[in-house]
Image (cartoon, rainbow, N blue to C red):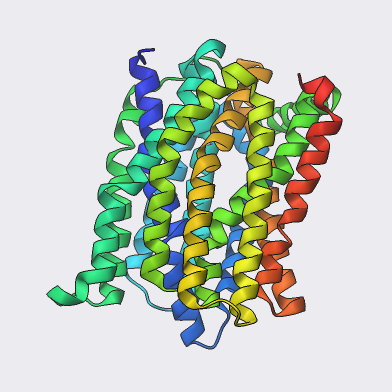
Amino acid sequence: MKFNKQEKSWIMYDWANSVYATIVMTAIIPIFFANMANTAGQSGDYWWGIGSSVSMAIVAVMAPFIGAFADYSGYKMRIFIFFLVLGLVFTFLFAVTENWILLLIAYIMSRIGFSGGNLVYDSFLTDVTDHERMDRVSSYGYALGYIGGSTIPFLFSIALVSFGSYIGIGSVLAIKITAIITVLWWGIFSIPFVKNVKQKYSVEKPEKGTVKNVLQAVLHTARDIFRNKKVLIFILAYFFYIDGVGTIITMSTSYGAALGLDSTGMILALLVTQIVAVPCSIAFSSLSKKFGSLKMIMTAVCVYFAICIVGFIMGLGMEQSFLTNSEALMLFWLLAILVGTVQGGIQAISRSYFGKLIPPEKSGEYFGFFDIFGKFASVLGPGLYALTKSLTGSSAMSILSIVILFLIAMVILIAGRKQLV
């Protein structure tokens, strides 16, 4: 299947923003932050979890209103550009400060920009393609994103962090250069999306009472979601399983750093995740046609359940000293491969499945609620991790607590299967 110009440009934004997801959210910046916070006598993974929760809470509260405004004719791209610039500016701040508190603030604000932009970006899916092509377009977006996040910027960043000392570049300077690379890659490759993607479906902006109309639209959409059993059941299950997915993405390297795993080994393992995720994301599109989207989502949830269990065993082994550092790192690599098989697929199919359920002219509003469920979930997961850590003092127990989220999601999917099919 050939993609048209708008589909290609839409897919390209996954290539553009993936560098932020990989370097800032997952791989390099969390380790840098954890080391800075630990040096200051703080718990790095604890505060990273708090920062993730705060940023997601802010976006979650804003999401339905962002979506409602975005549905107005001509507004969708303007709102996207605002969040894009917000993310780029605060990501650049990683290059100019070494204070762990300022780093945390920069992370919170940049992730608000990243997440707000993604909300609007996702809602454009109904504008650029049709129902028949939606799974494939969404899956190729994630696949290209993994290629983008795991090629030039990520490899160059790994080389800087790992071998920069041989050419006189210290670890801190390497991180700052990495932050600048992230900003440039994200910004430059966003240009095709901004230039070529157009808002096809919209509602007319009222001449007056805009805020009142937005509030009414949000309430109306919320009522429609609660009346539509298919949408409601799916979005509730999504709330829990995407929470677990997001928590694992956000906390993986911070968790490993807390256990004392080698930073370079973890980063290389995450590179494997990116590589494995490329064909697996595309495969999810084909398999969803053969077996159905819901079966593929449920399969992915089961894999994530296993990931949490293996992660717990790895952490417990380090805390109880029955695993060596090298043995634990091998388990981390196994986890990286397992995550790669399902991470892109579950997100891509969830996005396109929801896109098929909603009216395209209200895609902003509906994806706003889709996003609010995802973002409040992102508050719950890292918050649950941080709470478990504070109560037990064990990082292993913290990662085990995430199993609860996948169990709840699976129960909802199984119980509501008749309505969802």
Left or right: 373, with 75 as reference point:
right
Q: Residue at x 52, y 19 (%)?
A: 134
Q: Quadrant of the C terminus?
A: top right
Q: Image height check: is 140 above or below 160?
A: above
Which image quadrant for residue 49? bottom right
Q: Residue 317 at x, y = what percent?
A: 62, 75
Q: Is residue 176 visible?
A: yes
Q: Image height check: is 300 above or below 385?
A: above
Q: Residue at x 41, y 37 (%)?
A: 278
Which image quadrant for residue 269? bottom left
Q: How many marks?
A: 0
Q: Residue 56 at x, y = what percent?
A: 62, 53
Q: Residue 81 at x, y = what percent?
A: 42, 38
Q: Quadrant of the N terminus?
A: top left
Left or right: 235, with 12 as reference point:
right
Viewer-nearest residue: 354 or 279: 279
Q: Residue at x 34, y 37 (%)?
A: 190
Left or right: 167, with 376 as reference point:
left
Q: Image height check: is 177 above or below 208?
A: below
Q: Residue at x 50, y 76 (%)?
A: 101
Which residue sits furthest left?
167
Viewer-nearest residue: 61 or 405: 405
Left or right: 341, with 393 as reference point:
left
Q: Residue 47 at x, y = what percent?
A: 59, 72
Viewer-nearest residue: 173 or 413: 413
Q: Is residue 87 visible?
A: no
Viewer-nearest residue: 355 or 401: 401
